Image (cartoon, grey):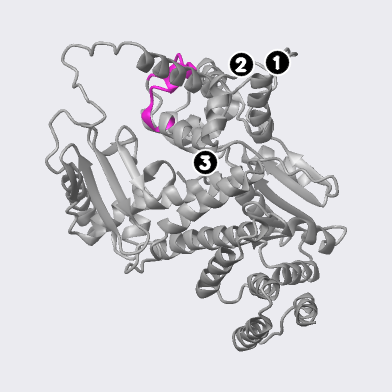
Amino acid sequence: MSETSHLLPQAERLVARLAALEAPLVQVWGWPGSGKSAILAAFLERQAGSASGLALGTLADAGRLREAIETAHAAGVRWLVTAGDPGESLAQAVRWLQPEQRLVFAGERRWRDPALEVALLPPQELLLRPGEVAALWELLTGSSPSPVIARRLQEASDGWYRPLRLAIEATGGAGLEAATPDLLLEISPLRFFLRHEVLDGFAAEEAESLLAAPVERRGREDREASAAWALLDSRGLWVEGPQRDRMPRLLAAGLHRERQRREARAGRPRPAATGAPQWSPEQRTAFVLCLLGAPVARQRGPEGETPVECRLKRSFQILAYLASSPGLEATREELVEAIWPTDGEQTIERNFHPTLSHLRRALEGERSKDAPPPLLFRSGVYRLNPELDWEVDVLDLLHRVEEGKSLQGRGDLPAAAEVWRGAWGLYRGPFLQGHYEAWVAARREGYQKVYLEMLRDLGDLYQRLGRSEEAIDAYRVVLIEDPLQERVHLSLMQLYAGQGRRDMVRRQYDRLCTMLLEELGVEPLPQTTREYHRLMG
C-alpha cells in the first residue's frame, strides 16, 4: 500500500514539528507502516513550494552527494531530504552541510552515533490522535465517525497508521464501533501486514524471543525478557505509559495468537466446526511467482505444480503489480494508472473488468468450490488473498536482504553472508524482463538498486571474512550492472594488491579512468588515485 500525504491526517502536525528542529541531521524514526515516507514527501512538498527543499535520492556516491549539497546551498536550499538509510554517507554529508542547512532522513532503527548531532522525530509522535483517526475515517469513507468510535479505534490500534488505514478500507468502517485489538486482527489485510511487514522484519530467533516477552516493561526483568525488550527498543516498537512502557496492543495481541496457535499444535487438534472445509497443509494452495528475469507463474497443490494460464498480457501485469506491491494490494486507480496509462476512459471501462475476470479464472483454475478465492475486492482495493500462500521472488529477495542486515548488525557475519548468497541466487535478471511499461521500469530500477547494494555489501563482508575470491566475484557482478561504482573498483584493486597481482590493479584502475572519462567526462576522486599509487608501491 502506498502511503500518500493526502491520506495522512497527521502530516500537517508532523511537518511543523520537523521544520522546528534545528540540528544539522534530523531523523524521522518510526515503526513499519507509520507513514514515514509520506511524512518526508509532505515535508518536501511544503519546502519545495518556497524553493527551500530538495530531494537528494540516495547518498551512495560521496562525490555526487557533495556536489548536490553545494549546488543546493548556492540555490538557497535549506532542507535536504533523502529516502532510506543513509549509512556511512551520513558522516560525510554532515561535514559538507552549511550552518543553515538541514538533512532529513527516515528509518525504523534509531541512528546512534555519538559523533553526530541527530534530532529525532520519535515513533510516539507519529501515532494518530483520536481527532486524526476521525479525519482518516472521513478521508477513506466520506463519512464521519462519532468521537467515541474514533477514540476506541485509536486506543485499540494505539494510532498506528497502516493498521488503521487497512481496517477502515477493508470494512468501510462497518463493525468497528466496538474496536478491540482482537477484533482488528480478524481483518485479513491487517493480519497479513502484522505477520509479513512487522514480524518478518525480525530474524527467526528474535521472533522467538518476542513470543516470550512480557507485554509491559518491568523494573527487574529476567535476561530473556530484557533481550526481548532490547529488540523492541531498537525498533522504537513500544508505547509510553504513565506507569510502564508497553508493547503496541496489536503486536501484543498478534503474539498472543501465535502462542495459542503453537500450544494448540503441541496438543491434540481441535475438531473442525460442522460444515467447515478441513484443510491440511498438504491441501493448501500456493502460488509461486518468479518475477525476476523472464516471468513465470505456477500454482502448487496436492498433486504438484501447474502453470497459471494467464494468456492476456495485461492480466499478468495486474498479477505482477499486486504481487510486488506492499500488502499484495492496489486500488483501482493505481491499477489503471499502471496498466492503462495512456488509454481513454471508454477504453478503460470496456477492458478493466474483463481483464480482472480473466485473471480470476486463471488463478482459480480447477480449485474446489470450498477453496478461498485467490483475488479479493473490498472497499475499492484489489488484493491477493492473504489466506493463501504467495511465494514471490522479489519479496523473498527483499526479506533476505533485511535478514542479512539484521544478522550483520548482531555480528554474525558468516550467517549474514550465507543469507545474502541465497538472495544473490534469487536474482535471475531484471524485474519482468521483456516488459517495458513505466511502472515496470520504476520497480525494476528499485529492485536492481537493492540487489546491487546487497552484492556490494556482500563483497565487503567476504573481504572482512578473508574470502577474497568470493568478494571478487560479487564485486565483478556489481560492475557488470553498474560499471561507474568507483568504490567497488577501488575494493577490487585492494583485493588484487593483497594477492600480489599488480597487473590487475593497474588494469582495474585504467578501466575506471576510461569509464569515468567516456561516461561522465571526469577523473577518479583524488583519494582513489592516491590509494592506487599506494597499492602500486
Secondary structure under tag 2 reads loop
| Residues at discs 2 and 3 in contact (Cβ within 8 Å) | no
Residue 389 within the segment the image draws in magenta: no
Q: Report if the CB atoms under discs 2 and 1 are less than 8 Å apart.
A: yes
| Residues in magenta, as a range | 175-190
Looking at numbered disc 2 in the image, what kind of residue is underneath it? Pro
Which sits earlier in the primary sequence, circle 2 or circle 1?
2
Distance CA(mark 2)–CA(mark 1): 9 Å
Q: Secondary structure at mark 3?
A: helix
Q: Quadrant of residue 386?
A: top left
- Residue 249: x %, y % from top left: 55, 20
Badge 3 amino acid: Leu
Which image quadrant for residue 71?
Answer: bottom right
- Read off the residue under disc 1: 221
Residue bearing the label numbered 3: 7
- Would you name the residue on which mark 2 appears? 214
Mark 3 surroundings: few (<14), some (14-19) or many (≥20) residues within 10 A = some
Closer to the camera: disc 2 or disc 1? 1
Residue 177 on the magenta span: yes
Say which quadrant the N terminus sits in: top left
Q: Do residues under tags 1 and 3 come within 8 Å of each other at their CB atoms?
A: no
Question: In this picture, is 122 found above or below 430?
Answer: above
Residue 324 visible? The answer is yes
Q: Earlier in the sequence, mark 1 or mark 3?
A: 3
Measured as percent of width and height from the top left, residue 156 is found at 53, 19
